[in-house]
Amino acid sequence: MHRLDTEPEVRPEGARIGVVTFPGSLDDRDAQRAVRLAGAEPVPLWHADEDLRGVDAVILPGGFSYGDYLRCGAIARFAPVMTSVIEAAGRGLPVLGICNGFQILCEAHLLPGALIRNDHQRFVCRDQQLRVENNDTAWTTGYSVGQTVTFPLKNGEGGFVADQRTLDELEGEGRVVLRYEGHNPNGSLNDIAALTNAAGNIVGLMPHPEHAVEPGFGPGSGSGTDGLAMFTSVLGVLITA
């Protein structure tokens, strides 16, 4: 895996991060706010448009794209904007998929495996502790390996599954980014909460870092800003690119 440099203190001037809105997206504005708080310019992108407007990174937000018909993310994967996202991701554009965005990344084969119905057959909504396993990705340089963070979690189809060969590959290559710590909320294999691709520019996760970016409003008894580093990390990567 390509190793990314640690995050510098300075931010790139005029960094622009696109946030895609699909029909049924719920957390697109939350993601835009997180981008703004991180020090970048959020750029709204529409599912029906192929133009990425020259953005430096893309976020696929949480929600219920196209009503989650067929399978979660299965229709969104064919949205016109995703043609451009897939092509740009192949060239190294940083892409973050949160919850439904993670499902879309798997459906688009930008990440392996699939997300299925939670093993207890119920929607889960809770503050979730996570262990950082990989800080070499475009979105996690601001964390330390072994660090425990807390993000909100809300999903009904959050169980990550893959065949044993794929799991062995993910583990062997260090591509698990976050694991559920203390309690597995949905039956994800190997307690996997987040993955990256081999290049480290694409990350998909089920928990919601965009809901943990402001003091007093995020989860836990600490600052409530554990998710902010996910958005500032990519800015550090962009300035060294």
Image: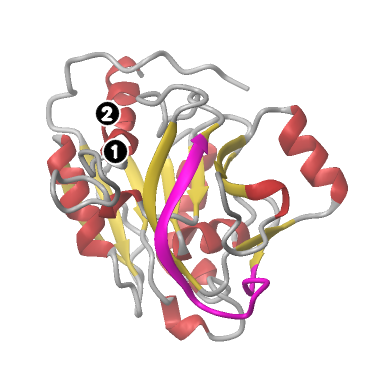
| Whether residue 166 is situated above or below residue 92 in the rendered picture | below
The image position of residue 163, as x and y in percent, is 83, 54
User: Is 146 placed above or below 169 here?
Assistant: above
- Is residue 9 found inside the magenta-colored segment of the image? no
Q: Nearer the viewer, residue 210 or 126?
A: 126
Mark 1–mark 2 distance (CA, rounded to whole Å): 7 Å
**Residue at the image position 53 percent from the left and 75 percent from the top:** 156
Placement of 131 over or under 31, stated as above or below? above
Number of residues whose C-alpha sits closer than 10 Å to that of mark 1, classed few (under 14), some (14–19) or many (20 or more): many
- Pick whichever, 157 or 31, lies toward us: 157
Tell me the kind of residue under disc 1: Phe
Task: Give me the residue at 15% from left, 46% from top.
Answer: 214
Q: In the drawing, does residue 173 fall left or right of residue 34? A: right
Secondary-structure class at tag 2: helix
- Camera-side mark, 1 or 2: 1
Q: Which residue is at a point 27% across and 43% down the rendered structure image?
A: 55
x, y percent for residue 127? 38, 56
Query: Within 10 angstroms of label 2, few (less than 14), some, or many (20 or more) residues?
Result: many
For mark 2, what is the residue? Answer: 235
Residue 154 location (% of width, % of height): 42, 67
Q: Quadrant of the N terminus?
A: top right
Q: Is 163 left or right of 175, judged from the image as shown?
A: right
Residue 129 part of the magenta-drawn span: yes
Q: Quadrant of residue 229?
A: top left
Magenta stretch, residue numbers: 116-131
Q: Any mark on residue 231, and which?
A: 1
Write the residue at 53% across / 71% down.
73
| Secondary structure category for the residue under label 1 | helix
The C terminus: image quadrant? top left
Marks 1/2 in contact by CB < 8 Å: the verdict is: yes
The residue nearer to you, when weighing 57 against 100, is 100
What percent of the width, then of the height, locates residue 186? 61, 64
